[in-house]
Amino acid sequence: MVGQNQTAITEFLLQGLPIESEQKNLFYALFLVMYVITIMGNLLIIFLIRLDSQLHTPMYLFLSNLSFSDLCFSSVTMPKLLQNMQSQVPSIPYAGCLTQMYFFLFFGDLESFLLVAMAYDRYVAICFPLHYTTIMSPKLCLSLVALSWGLTTLHAMLHTLLMARLCFCADNVIPHFFCDMSALLKLSCSDTGINELVIFITGGLILVTPFLLIITSYARIVSSIFKVPSARGMRKAFSTCGSHLAVVSLFYGTVIGLYLCPSADNSTVREMVMAMMYTVVTPMLNPFIYSLRNRDMKGALGRVFCGKKSPFSV
């Protein structure tokens, strides 16, 4: 009977955002503009780093991967959200739902690992400036990027395969705007104990551990900064880390607020708002944070599009 019920469910219905019907067009336009800005902003950063040889450094290797991750992370949910806002039946096929969940986990985890790699890069640059080029060798940088991609692939695949083994019975309405893993587990009529155990174990490894590594890196950075005798040196060191700290605060602030500090009433609306923050708002703001606070990026923008030479060029 369970098998028959499972085969009957070939698609899920995404409940979407709690928006009044008369406001749908307004929010549709808003989300469309945000998505276009996200795509254009992150593509601009990728192309600038690709085209400007002065940005061919470890930090910008990580940044280009982060921008690609942000671009894809937003694309996992936003096109389907925009489509469903204009659809009378906001459905998603069973296979499409699992695919969306896989890439959502993949690019979310990838961003977390890349932020750790960028924190380590800043740590080496400030605490060991004379040995920076030796420590942050091209081999190490590529290894860190490859490790990030490899670990996230395995983690996302693990959860997707565990979800695929579950049975889904009568209820196929997902109270979210995308195929959230926790929402899918609530719909399952199978025993989800193994899934929940794996989420608990890997959640600490994938989310908490990177966050603690970033905190440790910045604790050492701050300690080194306060040893700098000149105020100008301290300002330069802080400005070097400012953009990365802002991105870390945006990403981990919303994720920790959603998953580690749940509300007492477990509000679905609150969960969707927080999810919108780190799936839509954060990827959109990251290019602005790195371009507006970063002299190298602004210099590259001038050199690539205006043909201006760097003041340090011969």
Image (spheres, grey):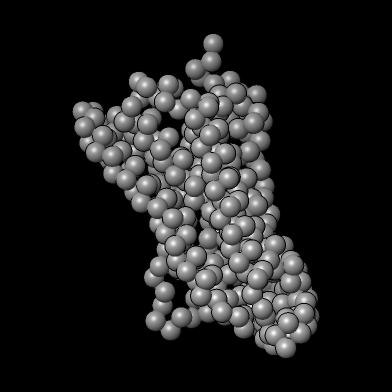
Residue at 44%, 44% (x, y): give it: 116
Say above or below: 54 vs 79.
Answer: above
Residue 6 in sight from this viewpoint:
yes
**Relative side of 257 to 167, left or right:** left
Residue 156 picture quarter: bottom right
The residue depicted at 50 percent of the width and 65 percent of the height is: 198
In the rendered image of this protein, does residue 54 appear above or below residue 69? above
The percent coordinates of residue 203 (x first, y second) are 46, 61
Please tell me which residue is depicted at 59% across the width and 59% down the height of the picture.
158
Q: Position of residue 287 (x, y in %)?
A: 56, 46
- Nearer to us in this view, 233 or 104: 104
- Where is residue 44? Give x, y as percent: 64, 40
Can residue 22 be seen here? The reply is: no
Q: Is residue 287 above or below residue 276?
A: above
Q: How many numbered discs sit on the rendered protein?
A: 0
Where, quadrant-wise, is the C terminus in this rendering? top right
- Extreme residue toward the top, this view: 314
> Which residue is nearer to you in this view: 255 or 11?
11
Q: Tell me which residue sits at (65%, 71%) in the image.
A: 165
Q: Quadrant of the N terminus?
A: bottom right
Residue 177 in picture, x, y percent from top left = 64, 72
Which picture quadrant has residue 300? top right
The quarter of the picture where residue 192 lies is bottom right
Relative side of 21 to 208, left or right: right
Which one is nearer the viewer's eye here, 6 or 88?
6
